[in-house]
Image (tube, grey):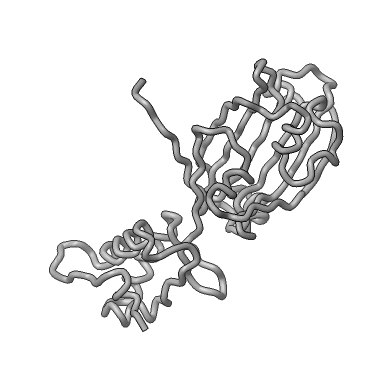
Amino acid sequence: MTSFSDRIGLLQEDLRVPLYLQLQQLVRQAIQSRLLVQDDVIPAERDLAEEYGVSRITVRKAIDGLAQEGLLVRRRGAGTFVAARVDKSFSKLSSFSEDMMARGRRPSSEWLSKSVGSVTPEESLSLGLSPGTRVYRFQRMRFADDVPMAVEYSTIVGHCLPSLDAVVDSLYTALEANGCRPVRALQRLRAMHFPSEQSKRLGVETGHAGLFIERRGFLADGEAVEFTQSYYRGDAYDVVAELNAS
């Protein structure tokens, strides 16, 4: 059976680099080169310490650093694993389901609530609606291969959907069927520490590093039809943007 060090490499004691940083780099490079892939198990601290001839403190320090980077994830009672990550491109307007399927992942959702009501002041400002305008609100959990990825809160202008029941799985599919799928969006992203409600839903500790993404979607004529606020796990999602000089 191939040992872990055979897979990712050995430490070099003659280098003037702390051993924990060397171990971190070996694991990091193995993940980047796909020698280690999503859900691969990282050996226990005791086993790694014995295999590499270092202290468990050295191993723990290396693993802690990689976990903070979001490359590894600890699962209580199960061990340490290579984290699942998804690249989200900001260059194309697509739904969560489309993003996941394009990456070979299986998307799914769990509805938290569906409701209809009058627009709130915040929604009115974001969507440019008059007070009293009817809107639909959707709150849901988003999963990739049954792993919780995000909590999403969407507000849709009332005339863009025939009813609450029109949205079964994909919100964008329902909007497209009604001729109201957004063709342009403005997105704002910021790093944050999750509050307790979102942490509990995503199965992470309160204060876990995450991404808050706010999106306004527009029709071709410039009418705003969608206002969505999403909380994405920072250890599972990377944002990618293509930049051009011209």
Instruction: Identify which residue is drawn at 71% across, 43% down.
Output: 170
- Dividing the picture into quadrants, the one containing residue 132 is top right
Screen quadrant of the C terminus:
top left
Instruction: Identify which residue is drawn at 45% across, 40% down.
Output: 240
* Residue nearest the observer in this picture, 95 or 232: 95
Left or right of 206 on screen, residue 48: left
Question: Is residue 2 positioned above or below 23 on the image?
Answer: below
Q: Is residue 108 visible?
A: yes
Left or right of 200 on screen, residue 179: right
Image x and y of residue 216, in percent: 64, 28
Numbered-mark total: 0
Instruction: Identify which residue is drawn at 46% across, 69% down.
Output: 40
* Residue nearest the observer in this picture, 68 or 173: 173
Image x and y of residue 3, in percent: 34, 79
Screen quadrant of the N terminus:
bottom left
Question: Is residue 1 positioned above or below 98 on the image?
Answer: below
Q: Is residue 125 visible?
A: no
Image x and y of residue 222, in percent: 65, 17
Image x and y of residue 89, in percent: 49, 39
